[in-house]
Image (cartoon, rainbow, N blue to C red):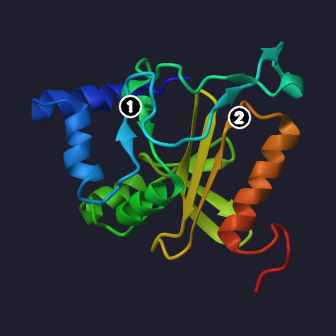
Amino acid sequence: MVRTNYVVLGLLVESVTNTSLARRLRERLFEPLELRDTAFVVGARIPGPHAHGYVSPIHDGVVLARDGGLDHTTDNATWAWAAGAIVSDAGDLARFYAAVLGGRLLPERWMAAMQRTIPAGGLRYGLGLAARRTPCGTAWGHTGDLLGYIAAVLSTRDARRQAVVMVNSEPLTPDAEAAVRRLIDAAFCGRAAGSPGR
C-alpha cells in the first residue's frame, strides 16, 4: 500500500525547492549523513549487491508460504516514489535514525511535534516516527515493506541503543511475523525477549 501522505510530501519538496526529490534527498540527507549505501531508486535495477525480495501469494487473506514466494527484486518501484523508492542497508538506516533522534536534522520544536503520538494498531504513531513498547522500554523508529522487503528500525531517544531488522520476504505468515517481532525485541534489548530485565 502506498502512503499518499509521503507522495504529497515529495511533491511539496519538489515544488518548494524547484528541484527533483532525488537531488534534494541526496544533497540534504544522503551526502551530509554519509549514507553511502542509500539511494533513491525509481527504476527496476537496485545498485550494488543486495538481497532478493520475495512476495508470497495470498488467497482469501491467508499467506501461502509453501512455495517461498516470487522474486520481485527487479520490479520497478517508481509507482511508490516518495513512499517507498529509497533503498538502503542496515548501517545507513541506523545512522539516519541516530541523526534524526539526535537532533542533527530538525529543530527541537519539530522533533517534539514528531514525537507527539496517537495510538494505532498496537503502536503509537507521530509524524514519521512510531513509538513501540519493548521488554526494555520504549523504542522509537519506523517500519516499512515493499516488493518483498521488510525493514524495522528501533532506537532509544538518544540513539545509544539501536536495532535494525531486515527481512526479504513479505507478507509474513502469523508465525513468522511473531518470530520477527521477538527477534526485533531481542536485538533491541540485547537479551532474549521476555526474559527478566537487568
Q: Position of residue 189 (x, y in %)?
A: 69, 72
Q: Report the residue at 21% width, 50% height from top.
A: 28
Residues under numbered marks 1 and 2 in contact, where contact means CB atoms less than 8 Å apart: no
User: In screen coordinates, is 6 left or right of 130?
Assistant: left
Expressed as whole percent of the image width and height from the top left, the position of residue 4 reads 42, 24
Q: Secondary structure at mark 2?
A: strand
Quadrant in the rendering for residue 6: top left
* Foreground pick, 118 / 39: 39
Instruction: Specify the farthest residue to the bottom.
Output: 198
Q: Nearer the viewer, residue 166 or 123?
A: 166
Residue with the mark numbered 1:
41
Find disc 2 in the rendering and name its residue.
169
Give the quadrant of residue 198.
bottom right
Residue 197 lies, with reference to residue 84, above or below; the image says below
Q: Earlier along the polypeptide chain: callout 1 or callout 2?
A: 1
In the picture provided, is 45 more to the left or to the right than 31?
Answer: right
Q: Residue 96 location in percent, x, y?
A: 40, 58
Up the image or down, 130 lies above or below 97; here it is: above
- Examine the rendered structure and indicate whether residue 177 appears above or below residue 165: above
Give how far apart the Cα atoms at labels 1 and 2 are: 19 Å
Residue 123 location, x and y as percent?
63, 49
Up-down relation of residue 196 to residue 127 (above or below): below
Residue 87 - label: none
Give the secondary structure at mark 1: loop
**Crowding near pointer 2: few (<14 within 10 Å), some, many (20+)?**
many
Quadrant into which the N terminus falls: top right
- Residue sitting at 60 percent across and 50 percent down? 152
Q: Nearer the viewer, residue 112 or 167?
A: 167
Q: Amino acid at mark 1?
A: Val
